[in-house]
Image (tube, grey):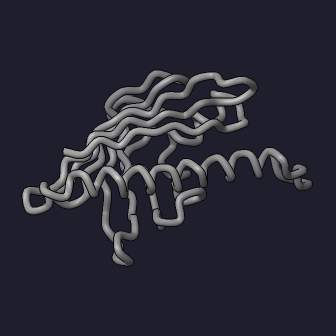
Amino acid sequence: MARVRGSIDIERPVDEVFDVVADQTNEPLYNPSMTDSGRLDDGTIGVGTRFLATVLTRGKPQEVAIEVTAFERPTEIATQSVMGRNTVLGRVRFDPAGSGTRLSWDWDVQVGTGARVLGPLVSVIGRRQERAIFGGLKHFLEDRAARPPREGLA
């Protein structure tokens, strides 16, 4: 098992950051490795909500099944993500930080039996990937807030 932890400060309100992250269908907007993400059920997002996403891994599309396992708006979301024989369990926290939000992640990555010796490498790569993904979220939210609204758009 590999552990991936980190945090990033985003100059947007906690509720806004939480809502964008909670709706997994938003992730392709800020994560260039995710090419698609859709809901598998209806209703309000919460415990049990499921998504199916497509990510590029070494240039090849891979399906990822994501299920929300804990949901406390606006402070924490926990998920289980399964891609092939790999499972990622973890939480994302949203805490006030100055005028914005400190987003923190803590993932346990369980790799398939043939790749267990790669645990330390998975941790390093995972930290880099998560930093890039949530850096993309930071830029997406902060840039969107800085743009003047266009006529006819909310």
Q: Is residue 85 left or right of residue 9?
A: left
Quadrant (top left, top right, bottom left, bottom right) of the N terminus: top left
Residue visible at 84% across and 47% down in the picture: 146
Name the residue nearer the viewer: 110 or 15. Answer: 110
Residue 90, percent from left and from top = 33, 36
Image height of 44 relative to 110, above or below? above
Location of residue 46 with respect to 96 vertically, above or below: below
Residue most toward the bottom? 59
Q: In this view, does 51 lie above or below 79?
A: below
In-front residue for pair 82/10: 10
- Picture residue at 28% right of the left edge, 45% below the top: 88
The location of residue 99, given as percent across then percent down, is 75, 26
- Residue appearing at x 13%, y 55% in the figure: 116
Q: In which quarter of the image is residue 53?
A: bottom left
Residue farthest along the left direction in this orientation: 113
Residue at 31% from the left image edge and 63% from the top image edge = 63
Horizontal side of residue 86 vs 104, given as left or right: left
> Which quadrant holds residue 43?
top left
Find residue 42 and report its horizontal and vertical position in percent: 43, 41
